[in-house]
Amino acid sequence: MGDIRLPQFGDEYDRSKMGSMVDTLENALARISSVFAFTKKGAYQLTSNTTPVGNVTVGVDTLMTYSLQPNVLAKDGYNISIKAWGTFAANANSKQLKLLFGAAVLYDTTALVVNNGTWVIESSVVRTGTATQQAVTFIISSNTTVVNSVTYIVPTETLSGTIVIKCTGEAVATNDIVQKGLLIKVFPQE
């Protein structure tokens, strides 16, 4: 993390130097706190996004996205938890929702006529090698057209590079699919 360099001042201190020193200490403590939270609790939240994003007219649209930085899954057994949720519009349009980990499709509803409802997708992706993972994913929806189910796949993403995690929506009209949230946590091997 490096040395913390604080401004020096004597008995006659400069107010701007004091403010700078306080800012430096706050930033350093925030970084230290993040490291302790990860190692002490065994988990670290990478992102929490609750700004709604909907699809736009016809075609595939990226809803929410997160770029997993290289080597976050540094050792075999390290894993991430992905939780995404949102809504389907109340109409008879065809809608298709996917969750992706890089090029790997963790879950795909396929094209369905879903008239209204909410959905949540959760996935655990576990590192098994430098370019291999195991992923188990499930979806639950308040609309029975979407079958509550579980999938298992073996992604082959290279973990030394950035991996984009995202939900996509393919539909007919704007906001047929709206993603309301995305939470991603990382868990080191204990």
Image (cartoon, helix red, strand yellow):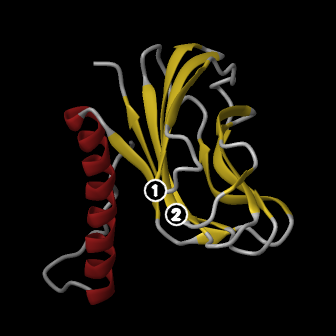
* Image coords of residue 71 (percent x, y): 56, 28
Left or right for 155, reference 7 = right
Residue 44, above or below 16: above
Report crowding for label 2: few under 14, some 14 to 19, many 20 or more residues within 10 A (C-alpha): some
Left or right for 44, reference 126 = left
Left or right for 10, reference 34 = left
Out of 81 and 27, give the one closest to the viewer.
Answer: 81
Q: Confirm or deny contact between disc 2 and disc 1 (CB under 8 A).
A: yes
Q: Residue at x 25, y 79 (%)?
A: 18
* Image coords of residue 74 (percent x, y): 49, 23
Residue 177, above or below 101: below
Q: Quadrant of residue 107?
A: top right
Instruction: Give the structural element (helix, strand or loop) at label 2.
Output: strand
Amino acid type, callout 2 = Gly
Instruction: Give the structural element (helix, strand or loop) at label 1.
Output: loop
Q: Residue at x 34, y 57 (%)?
A: 5
Identify the image quadrant of the C terminus: top left
Indicate which disc, 2 or 1, sits on the residue closer to the N terminus: 2
Residue wearing tag 2? 117
Q: Residue at x 52, y 72 (%)?
A: 51
Residue wearing tag 1? 142
* Image coords of residue 76 (percent x, y): 47, 13
- How many numbered circles does the render carry? 2
